[in-house]
Amino acid sequence: MSLPITAKNNAQGHLEVGGCDVTQLAKEFGTPLYVVDEATLRDSCCQYVNSFKELYPNTEIAFASKALCTVGISKIIAEEGLGFDVSSGGELFTVLKAGADPKKIYFHGNNKSVQEIEEGIKAGIGRFMVDNEQEILKLNASAEKLGKDAHILIRVNPGIDAHTHEFIQTGKIDSKFGVPFEQLESFINKIKEFKRIKLEGFHAHIGSQIFDVKPFIEEVKLLLALTKKYGTKEINIGGGIGISYTDSDNPPAIKDFAKEIAGVLKGETDAKLILEPGRSIVGRSGITIYTVGVIKDIPGIRKYVLVDGGMSDNPRPILYDAKYEALLGNKAGAKPEETVRVGGRFCESGDILIKEVKLPKIEPGDILVTTCTGAYNYAMASNYNRVPRPAMVIVNNGKARIIVKRESYNDLTLNDAH
């Protein structure tokens, strides 16, 4: 089970993370509750920075903020020296508020608004990722209006099949992302018509939750060839390395991944390498704490364990059948003895967090903890059934502090007009 690096069972038989007993966190802050372990988060950042610094020094790590974007999280990541990949004006606003270096911000999105483009130019961000002619026209017009150059990377569609879920593949030929290769030459020629647009290099992203390094090697070789052909100086390979949600997952170690990527580039180019990891930075650092409510035993079928959260705080299982593991935080040392299905509180039959998990004898009031929820849980949370979104705390050295307040009913109606 992939728990945060500080996780342990304490003398009371409870799960402890960051020196904090999860049962006490539940009492103090309520449930559902997102918990992020600061030590694990910082360790993941350091693994990326140090692994690539050693093997290919001209590397920049930019956190894919779509995985988890709050001011508190972004501040920690910026302190570790990372830049940021943003995909909206809201993400841009958040990371700037956290103190991110604008020059280390990469602005993604295949349909940016004029407002977002102008926000990026005014902030002095490092690069815009561009993959369509309409954006070039908008970007140039905004750059002319503001009297500043816009530095871009072209997002190409590499046509690489990364072996992951269809919904998180982004590099295959039939994709809404990227310039197809047969259109690349004319696209580059179009860019040359605009004085305010400065082409710095190429970008590709092949997908997410990928365990095989081979597709990344194909991607790097492809971008290297484009770099040589067009004389550019930046290669951005996106993100996509997976994490171990379950014991059957086997992602590569970051240092091994760095070795393979650096091996393609060393001696071939002095171009700057940019990576945009998201899940592999924050995924393992997060857990979610729930309180067990109803237990429904259907003889001969299964036992349902229903918690006080579900698809609104973690939509990944219902979106693409994502798998998670769980344990009882108040019975962390107890022997698993029954197989159950963990469901949520929402009015959808598909609101199932875990289809099958073996747990100790479970009772109403138990504290259920799901692991590896740092990425794409809070980030994709909703107010379905008009349920307020959970709070988030960060834990370190026995102390917990709120970094996202729990929403109230008043928050739910704040923007309602009547």
Image (cartoon, rainbow, N blue to C red):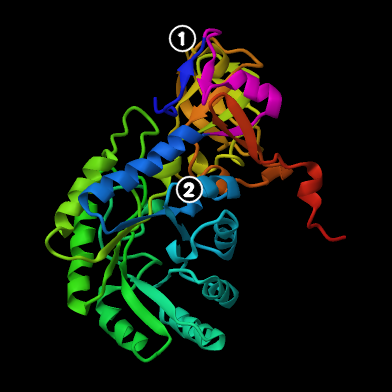
Which residue sits at x=42%, y=51%? 81
Tell which circle, 2 or 1, labels the residue nearer the N-terminal end. 2
Left/right placement of residue 329 relative to residue 276 reads right
Q: Judging from the image, what secondary structure is the residue with disc 1 in?
A: loop
Number of marks in the image? Answer: 2
Left/right placement of residue 28 relative to residue 328 reads right
Q: Is residue 16 magenta?
A: yes
Marks 2 and 1 in Cβ contact (< 8 Å): no
Where residue 362 sits: x, y (%)?
57, 13
Q: Is residue 347 magenta?
A: no
Amino acid type of the residue tagged 1 in the rendering? Glu
Q: Is residue 382 above or below residue 226?
A: above
Q: Rounded to the nearest whole Å, what is the CA distance between mark 2 and mark 1?
A: 44 Å
Left/right placement of residue 109 relative to residue 277 reads right
Which residue sits at x=53%, y=74%? 117
- Quarter of the figure with the N terminus: top left
Which residue sits at x=76%, y=48%? 412
User: Residue 314 — which label?
Assistant: none
Q: Is residue 317 above or below residue 356?
A: below
Mark 1, residues whose alpha carbon is within 10 Å: few (<14), some, or many (≥20)?
few
User: Residue 79 — which label?
Assistant: 2
Where residue 252 sits: x, y (%)?
26, 39
Amino acid type of the residue tagged 2 in the rendering? Glu
Which residue sits at x=39%, y=40%? 44
- The residue carrying mark 1 is 337
Q: Which stretch did the figure color magenta?
A: 11-36
Residue 30: tell me if it is visible.
no
